[in-house]
Amino acid sequence: MSHNSFGHLFRVTTWGESHGPALGAVVDGCPPGIRLDTSDIQTDLDRRKPGQSKFVTQRREEDLVEILSGVFEDDRIRESHGGQITTGTPISLMIRNTDQRSKDYGDIRDKFRPGHADFTYNAKYGVRDYRGGGRSSARETAARVAAGAVARKVLNAIVSGGVTIRAALVQMGPHQINRANWDWDQVNENPFFTPDAAAAAFYETYLDGIRKAGSSIGAVIEVVAEGVPAGWGAPIYGKLDQDIASALMSINAVKAVEIGAGFDAASLSGEDNADEIYARQDGTPDFRANHAGGILGGISSGQPIIARFAVKPTSSILTPRKTIDTSGRETEILTKGRHDPCVGIRAVPVGEAMLAIVLADHALRHRGQVG
């Protein structure tokens, strides 16, 4: 079992560190004949990349993706498909790091940041990359977003009409959006990826205060997939929601995941929680609610798939904190450098990518099971 790979038939392996020369992903299992160019991937990476506003880390990375393998183009393919297509072999994607400032971390090379993975990485491996956290850095998620863009292409090739995957920030700190104001068009119109314009205006002042204080705050992200047909997933150990929870939980800094009503389902009655089903004139099911989040018994119902995940506050903060060093001595630490005051903001496209990867994998698994 690889600790750097995810998926079964559509399998993603990521590699690289925050302050290494590059990072990337190898996507195995992508079907052949799918049109794929760097522009298909770059659009998603541009939404995740740092330095786009004062509310995210000021590290300047263009996050330009290179496709190193798994695609082919000649005159005939260019004429029939308009560009290069996948060959069915592993697709290797690379994103070069160009703005590392490793010297920012010199003061903490022998100290463990509370709340970060410094102590546990050192406990497991006996060595840790203190320059930005290495693999435990949120920088690793760029590779996931690149792989997720390939997964979207697979889904749109398999599903008639395509699958739409969108995410939004629905809570920052204790402050939730007003769902009556939900407007998907607003998500890319503000630096917080929130669907509530009024909440975006509030978050601007709220997060600016946190940023200036050198502190950080957490967030909740909601991700929604529409167009997924009924039948994907399998009972017991192959559940679709099980794999979604695993994928979202694997994102750096995520501490909780819920599907549909999630934890709120525990406070509902059986009558309220049941998503009653009526029949449309054509005999197709008409669900009147979606507390299940589009998944019943681990299998998609055809309703929108809805999941949420909670992102903790960034552990690298300017406020001095008590910790120990590598010799076990008590000391104090504060972290200089460039960090997200709310890393949950840039987790929005990451959540979309991980859901896309799971759905692409289950689409291929379903096709293999039932044809």
Image: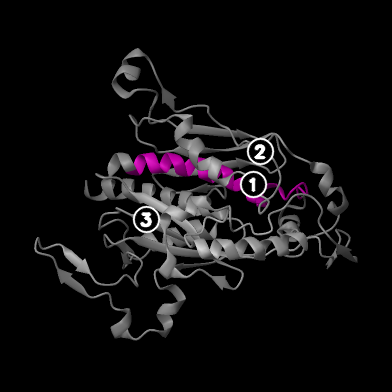
Q: Which mark is residue 61?
A: 2
Residue labelled with disc 3: 225
Lateral position of residue 19 relative to residue 222, left or right: right
Secondary-structure class at tag 1: helix
Relative depth, front residue between 23 and 237: 23
Q: Which amino acid does label 3 sit on?
A: Ala
Inspect this view and state whether residue 199 appears: yes
Mark 2–mark 1 CB contact (< 8 Å): no
Q: Is residue 54 above or below residue 294?
A: above
Residue labelled with disc 1: 139
Which tag, 3 or 1, sits closer to the chain's start?
1
Q: Where is residue 340 in the image (x, y as percent from the top left)?
A: 68, 54
Q: Position of residue 99 (x, y in %)?
A: 72, 37
Mark 3–mark 2 CB contact (< 8 Å): no
Q: Where is residue 181 in the image (x, y as percent from the top left)?
A: 43, 66
Classify the position of the C terminus by image quarter: top left
Q: Distance between the residues labelled 2 and 1?
A: 10 Å
Residue at image point 32% right, 24% down: 81
Figure quadrant of residue 261: bottom left
Q: In this view, does 157 lie above or below 223?
A: above
Which tag, 2 or 1, sits closer to the chain's start?
2
Q: Which amino acid does label 2 sit on?
A: Glu
Relative depth, front residue between 253 and 126: 253
Tell me the magenta residue range: 128-155
| Secondary structure that dominates the magenta span | helix
Secondary-structure class at tag 3: strand
Q: Label 1: few (<14), some or many (≥20) within 10 Å?
A: many
Lateral position of residue 337 relative to residue 271, left or right: right
Lateral position of residue 79 relative to residue 3, left or right: left
Q: Does the magenta stretch include residue 133?
A: yes
Q: Is residue 24 above or below residue 257?
A: above
Q: How far apart are marks 3 and 2 (CA)?
A: 29 Å
